Image (spheres, helix red, strand yellow):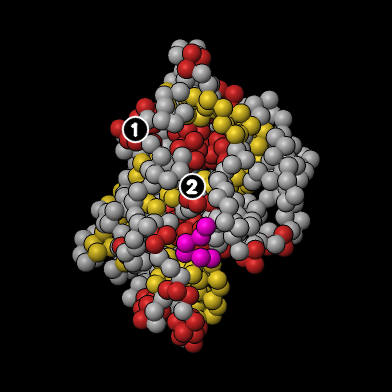
Amino acid sequence: MTYRISAFAGSGFLGLPCIFYLAMTFSNSLSAQSGDWYWISFRSKPAGSYSLNQPQAFLSARSIARRVRQGIPLDSSDLPVYQPYIDSIQTAGGIVKHRSRWLNGVTVRIPNNDSLIRQRIMSFPFVRLSTPNGRVAGSGRDGIIKNKYLEEKLVPLPSSEISNRTSSVYGFSGGQIRLHQGDFLHNRNYRGQGMRIAVFDAGFVNMPNMPVFDSLYLRNRIVDTYDFVDMDSGVYEFDSHGTYVMGCLAANIPGQLMGTAPEAQYMLYRSENNVGGSENPVEEDNWVAAAERADSAGADVFNSSLIYTTFDQPSMNHPWSDMDGNTARMTIASDWAAAKGILVVNSAGNYGGGPWYKIGAAADGDSVLAVGAVDTLGQRAGFSSMGPTADGRIKPNVMSVGAGAASCQIPGPGVAYISGTSFSGPIMAGLAACLWQALPSRRNMEIFDLLQRCANRQSNPDTFNGYGIPNMQLALTLAGFSPNGMNDYPQIRLYPQPASLTVPSTLEWEAGIPAGDYRITWYNMAGQFIMSQDYVRISDERNLMRLENKPGVGLYIISIVGLFYQDRIPCLINL
């Protein structure tokens, strides 16, 4: 079975309304502001001026195409938050930073933590809940400045050791790729082309100036950037952690360093505020806002090296009972992302040697691929967080190299060996993107399942290693992969596109599509039946078929179902 989406190929995100960009204009120096953050959720979600049959007003064509390809109908969770609710909160004195369509709520700053403003907001009949989210300007836990990533290790290679390139195209990153048979994918030209990976982190210092990332910028593979902490586009400052993560994903200096998806497209989002060592739940809201933007812009895979358990104010900490996959907002949003057809990959955490020792949010999500850490020999790293979840599910899901992983030196040139599940996650996310590229007709959770089934402990998973170390060659075998078979399906194309109510529309059937009886059905983007017609295909040769009727102006899915062939085609109809 194949689901072809050709009408949206190459579409971008730049035409989307600004509601996904800014809730309001913020100062770049949030530390100069006073007040507290709150999460406000709403009781209902009117559609307002938006319609599920006109999703191009709030989702990119690529995002819509991902849903169509995987048979995911639009619903109210895709609609923007009702603007009159936001207007009322701002009139009451609250300052809206983020809005979440998935969770139907907003992140609000209450200036000076004014109790009258809080009371006004809570008095609105549409407000369901108000939850404190931390201080706007924190001084770190107990006044002590602490780097969130302090426990992660960095060992630069002496320049004398990297002056000459190795005989392998992978250079110093060969061990972390070959442990998964990732070279089997790369050798068949699955290196992430056409896949879009969103990376959530604390900053990407110096990336545009580093030769190891030249190919990203020369070929315009950085397709979106945004800072959800300071609400601007400046992600290349504050922290270098995201740069090391990108070294595992996208580095491309043959013979020295190679990422697992060197030819994918990337979206770089700063959601973690690691400045000053402060940790507040509002950073989970930053992540949710970034995730929804990534969904709207058409991401296929999420990579998040962020874990949340404790905060500056102990009363806001996540107790272990929160790690049930249904409580932390970041976890709930991760599962929503998966429901929209995105493969969500999250590091398991580095708590394995400490008193907490288990996973944190959002690795607890049941639709989140949590990745623990091993070395290049496949031995588990002692710092790698373990499971199970609070409700007894296996975590981590799989393992990848996070002990002595090879990444870039900053500012470069050079190579550094780094340790932390922050790096096992992106190594696996990149390989997962390449695997999905090789199996384009699969849904996100089918790729998730394949990664577990192809792992070396799939028959005896445990709470230390999950299902083990995935093998990409085995994954393709389990999927019935054939370069000349399942990935070369013939297609059906719609002309013209966009369609018009006044101009006839035609379906072009490529040679190779089986002869037989077909039912052609129109659905709106909420998955509701509109109309259908029958078609008898006499032979398997190329031919053209005129559509008898078309519904009104809007965006639709044309479903084509026969005994041995199925397809879904999006159709935008204008006047």
Find residue 382 and report its horizontal and vertical position in percent: 72, 37
Q: Which secondary structure lies at badge 1?
A: helix
Q: Main secondary structure of the magenta part?
A: loop
Residue under label 2, please give it: 201
Q: Are marks 2 and 1 in contact (CB under 8 Å)?
A: no
In the displayed structure, 349 sits above or below 573; it is above
Mark 2 or mark 1, which has the lower sequence index? 2
In the displayed structure, 560 sits above or below 203; it is below
In the displayed structure, 500 sits above or below 83; it is above
Residue extent of the magenta highlight: 134-139
User: Split into 4 quadrants, where in the image is the C terminus?
Assistant: bottom left
Q: How many numbered marks appear? A: 2
Residue under label 1, please give it: 209
Q: Which secondary structure lies at badge 2?
A: strand
Q: Nearer the viewer, residue 48 or 568?
A: 48
In the image, is 144 to the left or to the right of 192?
right
Identify the amino acid type marked 2. Answer: Asp
User: In the image, what residue occupies the spot 38% across and 36% down?
Assistant: 206
User: In the image, what residue occupies the spot 64% across and 56% down?
Assistant: 309
Find residue 199 and report its horizontal and vertical position in percent: 47, 45
Find residue 383 and report its horizontal and vertical position in percent: 69, 39
* CA distance for labels 2 and 1: 19 Å
Q: Nearer the viewer, residue 249 or 184?
A: 249
In the displayed structure, 352 sits above or below 230; it is above
Mark 1 neighbour density, 10 Å: few (under 14) some (14–19) many (20 or more): few
Mark 2 neighbour density, 10 Å: few (under 14) some (14–19) many (20 or more): many
In the image, is 457 to the left or to the right of 46?
right
Find residue 343 and report its horizontal and vertical position in percent: 53, 48
> Residue 138 magenta-drawn?
yes
Q: Nearer the viewer, residue 396 or 515?
A: 396
